[in-house]
Amino acid sequence: MSRYAKITETLDWGILLTTVFLMAIGLLCVYSSTSGTGSGIFFKQLLWICIGTVFLVVAFAVDYRNLMYSAWPLYGAVVVVLVLVLIIGREISGARRWLIFGPFRMQPSELAKVFVIIWMAYWAEKKKHIIIHGMRELFFPALVILVPVTLILLQPDLGTAGIVSFIAAAMFLMLGIRRSTLLTLGSLFLAGLPFLWFSLKDYQRLRIFTFLDPSRDPLGSGYHAIQSKIAVGSGGLIGKGFLQGTQTQLKFLPEHHTDFIFSVVAEEWGFLGSGLLIFLYMMLITKIITVGLKAKDRFGALLCFGIAAYFTLHVFINISMAVGIFPVVGVPLPFISYGGSFMVINLICIGIALNVAWRRFIF
Amino acid sequence: MKPNITNPHLDEDIKSKSRYLIAFVFILLGILTLRLFVMQIINGSYYEGLSRNNRIRIISVPAPRGKIFDRDGVVVADNRPAFNVMVLPEDISDPKNISMRLAPLLDKPASEILQAILKGKSKPYDPLVVARDITFNQVAKVEMEVFNLPGVSIETIPEREYLFGSLGCHALGYIGEISKRQLEEKEGQDYAPGDLIGKSGIELVSEGTLRGTKGKRVFEVDARGQRVRVLDEKEPIPGHDVKLTLDQDLQAIARQGLGDKAGAVVAMAPSTGEVLVMESTPGFDPSIFAVSMLPQQWKDIIGDPMHPLENRAMRGAYPPGSVFKIVVTLAGFHAGILDPNARVFCPGHFNLGRVVFKCWKPEGHGSVDLVEGIVRSCDVYFYTLGRALGIDAIAEVGFRLGLGARTGIVLPDESPGLMPTKAWKRKRFGQPWHPGEHVIAAIGQGYTLVTPIQMAKAMSAVVNGGRLYTPRIIAADKPVLERDLGIPGRQIDLIKAGLKGVVEDAHGTAHSLWDKEISMGGKTGTAQVARGYVSKLPDESDIPYKLRDHAWFFGFSPVEKPEIVVVALVEHGGHGGAVSGPIVRDVIKGYYLLKEGMREQVRQDN
């Protein structure tokens, strides 16, 4: 089969290798931040990478256009689990985010991010005759996106709800929105902000206050922010070296193998390491956007743009949090943070991007 | 050749806009790079200084656990201050030296202390305990030296104390170091490895109430690890107290009655479901679980053939013996086939085909009606009734009385017992129900298994006129009426007349308990473990322990308007009336003494 013989030539090696490189850095950091705890988190992460790779291969091998037919069913499934999590989810510190089945647990709002990308791309493909979108054209897709967003807000998980709406907004913008519509929506959003503020839970408001003034709460989230900043800053140019980060080995940051893992990179590998990491993300994301540009249909293009937006937001929010320019919200760093379902979803995204890149050679 | 096909369908518009997307990514990531450059290169040395001098230490302060009271407000579980010697491995530069100097102060071998410190080296910022619960004398000695011992400190820690030792230990439960599984279950609730947590009994079920909120102490240390000043302190919030429905003085009477025998006593207020006594023997001292337990102690408890950890009041399921005849009587009424005045002739045995079932009294009871049947516990009377009813009709009423199901008391690890039916046997053994099994089921032998708490619940419903209450042990919980059985008053009166006669009538099986000052009714039960042994050997002590009968007694008082129901079970105790009866009578007597305010006298008697 000649069509498979060319796989080595036609595969987007840039995306694949960057991903592998990022995961290798991630493993080193997870190892460092959990060394001496005997928790076996490193090996769990390794296992999740293997599982994720299987998913990547599947996401790559099955023609991505099949996703179009599953856009509605997947969307329906996500809405169902989001409702389910509100009813039977495990409540942890005031929020219902986790579904727990024995040893297996998942955060349905993570899935929502990817499925919203797929649905948006599907919709764009279906309506490819529309070039510029006004209120009338936007009404239906906006409604469709608002359902999962509202369900996530009810958990409440402000961060994820924000990310989902932001991805959707970025994809709309790529499709083209009439200027007047854009202005109207923008002003509506600004007008809605105060309402949003009052609908926040106390601990969420507290986080925003602490972000503005970390010394308000030196023991709570402000403490994380300060310790994380010290960790990042003290890395200097070349860092303190692998396993040598004094802040990291201080077990003050309870989430330093998940949400605060960037401080491990920055402290132990310095500006060279953190700069390299950001460079790798930049490579990966621009590569994915380029794939989207060359895609043979609107569906593939929008999938890639959505995935690019997804990675960008995670990287930006997570690192901003670690360097103290964003409030402490629970957003992990793709390929680096410890977390099973997150890793699997990221690798599925990569699989889809590779899929889009490869299929443009096949007619 | 590598084909490079651009998509002709993709609108040019989107293409041009993707430039904005890329620009957007560059700007965002550029901001981060810039920020990192400023932090790591320009201000790097500033942060480095902060990190080198990061001499902030955090110690979490455990909250004092809520107390547990009995129904009269007597403290049953309390906290006492204990002094632990802690080290922070990070601040110990010379572990060998420190352990050599600590050893004589703590009367511990230096090698042991050294080992503990070295073990903590992988987590240098987690304080660890090198000596638990040291004496006041030792505290003074260490305190004098502490400025010479950087990294060493004495922390006052509330240690759990059970003031009555093993009395009521099964209901109270115990606390111990949190397990890995519990840590995962309690994620997000601020538990850390090494924390103490409720493991069984009330300590487990009321963990959320008792626990309180941990505090934190943040302090600065100097280069030598000495505490310079406290930067911040968050006081722990003590846990809430829990008041039980148990009465410790009654518990003590029950315990004394059980003595060194294995068994259980449950006392309930029949009209509310309040559990006044829940005692199971042998017991254990719950306080040894809270402090680090020696492996030998654990082995002793686990390996004890009498299973002291087992709460026999709820976990122990036994054949109910003749106490079950009350259930069968109700089933007879329920099915409408029982005429209380009809007489049955007991020749000392009952024939079913060619099989002969003996009455416990070989010479027979002669002609008996229902009340006499209960008073004298005539087996033949109930064989006849049981055969007429069949097991399913008996089980129907058994289920209504809560048998074969957990009682719903909040304590964990309750056994549901067993209320067999024909369908159950077919499913369990693949065999039909044999006619003879209807007969023996009627005297509480065979497959039926009942726990003491189930018995107390069911008998409470019988004597209070048919209202089935869920047993409850936490005073703040509201009474839960599960159902009103709707038993006609006349039927209750007849049964109660029988139960009264068991004690008062000269022919009653528990007449030895009769006390003219106490209005009391009850029913004996002698549950055979090995069939046939009972009547063959003249002296009970000749029977091997494990084959001796279980002794049941259920009593209530006063007969007219019962205030207390007591169930006692002695494993392999022999005859119910003789062994368990006196325990029940003593608890009832104690109940009245306490009611009359003679608590001091009760305590002295014990």
Image (cartoon, rainbow, N blue to C red):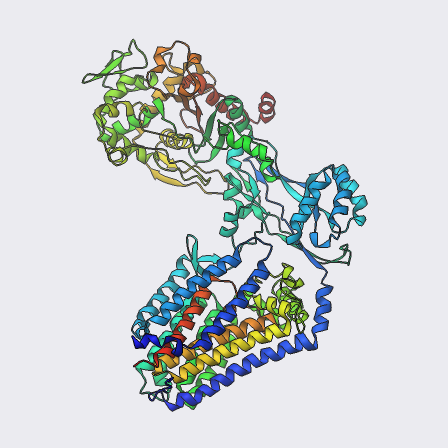
Viewport quadrant of the N terminus of chain A? bottom left
Task: Give the residue displayed 57% in from the left and 47% down from the top.
Answer: B211
Viewed as shown, does residue A161 lie left or right of B374?
right
Front-lying residue, B436 or B466: B436
Front-lying residue, B125 or B532: B125
Whether A301 is drawn above or below B299: the answer is below
Place residue B544 in its image quadrant: top left
Whether A159 is drawn above or below B440: the answer is below
Place residue A144 in its image quadrant: bottom left
Q: How many marks?
A: 0
Q: Which residue lies furthest to the left in this view?
A: B353
Place residue B6 in its image quadrant: bottom left
Residue A173 screen position, x and y as percent: 43, 84
Front-lying residue, B84 or B337: B84
Residue B199 screen position, x and y as percent: 52, 41
Front-lying residue, A278 or B80: A278
Viewed as shown, does residue A33 lie left or right of B403?
right
Residue B188 screen position, x and y as percent: 53, 56
Viewed as shown, does residue B498 lie left or right of B386?
right
Viewport quadrant of the C terminus of chain A? bottom left
Residue B569 screen position, x and y as percent: 43, 25
Task: Give the residue displayed 38% in from the left and 27% down from the top.
Answer: B318
Tell me if residue A90 can be seen: yes
Tell me if residue A324 can be seen: no
